[in-house]
Image (cartoon, rainbow, N blue to C red):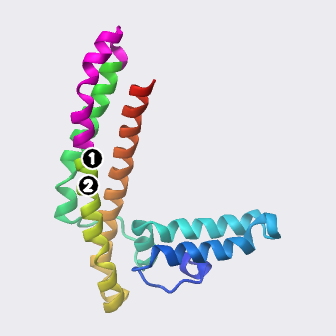
Amino acid sequence: MSAYARLGMPKVLALEEKTLEARFQELGKQAHPDVGGSDEEFETLRRAYEVLKNPASRLQEALEEKNPRGNVATQVMDLFGPVADGVQKAEAFLTERTAARSELGRALLDTRVPALKKELEALGAQLHEVEKMLTSRFEVFDQQGWQHCQTEMSETARGLTFVTKWQAQLRHVTGKLFEALMG
């Protein structure tokens, strides 16, 4: 059963997040094991919600031909180098900070954190803008009909997959920076 069918949602890409969340909560109240549902039923519902909540996985769900290879939007690929560089700089800093033998050494290294944080935040903002640009096509796909937009939908799905992965990498390394400073 598709995620759309499981949640009783219309098969459109431009879903309102609040509507989707409300539908999940409504069905969750019936499917939850505490109110007579089953673990399996609730887990199936939760997985369907997670698929439709994420724009990249929602688009993958909508694609008739699931093809992970092909073109990726230039705006996405232009961020590959900068994101990799930003993550590498943060990882190198963390390695260097871990190897520091004194509090003074760590304190001197910590003066680099604001610049690293600013760079990671700027990359996150760029990724968010690219994500908005990609998801703005959802309404067009819905209007034109998915069967007529398969190639562009596939390209958009691949782009969103990269963006989602890079956003997670940035969150992870930012969290590690925070932990290092707090610990």
Quarter of the image where one finds residue 140: bottom left
Question: Which amino acid type is marked by label 2?
Answer: Ala
Q: How many marks?
A: 2
Q: Tell whether 15 sits left or right of 157.
A: right
C-alpha gap between disc 1 and disc 2 = 6 Å
* Residue 179: percent from left, percent from top: 43, 30
Element assignment for label 2: helix
Q: Is residue 98 above or below residue 26?
A: above
> Could you tell me if the residues under marks 1 and 2 are in contact, i.e. CB atoms within 8 Å?
yes
Q: Residue furthest right?
A: 36
Mark linked to residue 121? 1
Say which of 75 and 71 sits in front.
75
Q: Quadrant of the N terminus?
A: bottom right
Majority secondary structure of magenta residues: helix
Would residue 70 appear left or right of 56 to someone viewing this image? left
User: Would you say residue 52 sits in the magenta stretch?
Assistant: no
Q: Name the spot of residue 71 as percent of width and height, x first.
A: 23, 67
Label 1 amino acid?
Glu
The magenta span reads: 98-121
Q: Residue at x 23, y 27 (%)?
A: 112
**Structural crowding at the residue carrying mark 2, measured as other residues with C-alpha within 10 Å and reported as few (<14), some (14–19) or many (≥20):** few
Secondary structure, mark 1, is helix
In the rendered view, would you say 16 is above or below 162?
below
Q: Is residue 63 left or right of residue 106?
A: right
Mark 2, residue position: 125
Relative to residue 104, is residue 176 depicted above or below?
below
Using the image as rendered, state which of residue 120 and residue 80 is in the foreground: 120
Percent position of residue 2, x then y: 56, 78
